[in-house]
């Protein structure tokens, strides 16, 4: 394993995984290529600055997903142009985000 892969950190986006369905305001993406059984998928995400006109409590995350077939080094984009806008999660009348 090369040094670059050893240094890679895996992260999760808590605001997406724990959000209630009502907190999702935008979810978009484009299926760009086939995924085959046995492929490894990796989703890369970036938190973006607020867009003009959106509430300050919303979080915008853009992403794309790559797939790797076992035995091949090349990766291919399988989801492009992905974006999620998440508002505050309301539980018991309080924002959790």
Image: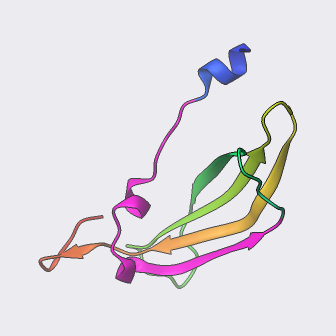
The residue located at (51%, 74%) in the rendering is 85
The residue located at (74%, 15%) in the rendering is 2
Provide the residue span drawn in magenta. 9-32
Residue 90 x, y percent position in the rendering: 23, 76
Front in this rendered view, residue 76 or 82:
76
Check the image and report above or below for 31 versus 11.
Answer: below
Is residue 63 highlighted in magenta? no
The residue located at (67%, 67%) in the rendering is 82
Front in this rendered view, residue 54 or 16:
16
Residue 36 x, y percent position in the rendering: 77, 53
Check the image and report above or below for 16 versus 66.
Answer: below
Q: Quadrant of residue 69?
A: top right
Is residue 13 highlighted in magenta? yes
The N terminus lies in which quarter of the figure? top right
The residue located at (44%, 78%) in the rendering is 24
Q: Quadrant of residue 74?
A: top right
The C terminus lies in which quarter of the figure? bottom left
Front in this rendered view, residue 83 or 48:
83
Q: Is residue 50 left or right of residue 82?
A: left
Q: Is residue 17 left or right of residue 1?
A: left
Q: Is residue 6 left or right of residue 16?
A: right
């Amino acid at each position: 394993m090369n040094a670059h892969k050893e240094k890679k950190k895996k992260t999760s986006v808590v605001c997406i995984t724990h959000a209630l369905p009502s907190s999702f305001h935008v979810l978009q993406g484009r299926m760009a290529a086939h995924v085959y059984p046995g492929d490894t998928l990796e989703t890369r995400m970036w938190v973006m600055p607020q867009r003009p006109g959106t509430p300050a409590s919303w979080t915008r995350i853009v992403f794309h997903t790559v797939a790797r077939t076992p035995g091949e080094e090349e990766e291919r984009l399988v989801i492009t142009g992905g974006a999620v806008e998440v508002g505050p999660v309301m539980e018991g009348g309080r924002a959790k985000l």
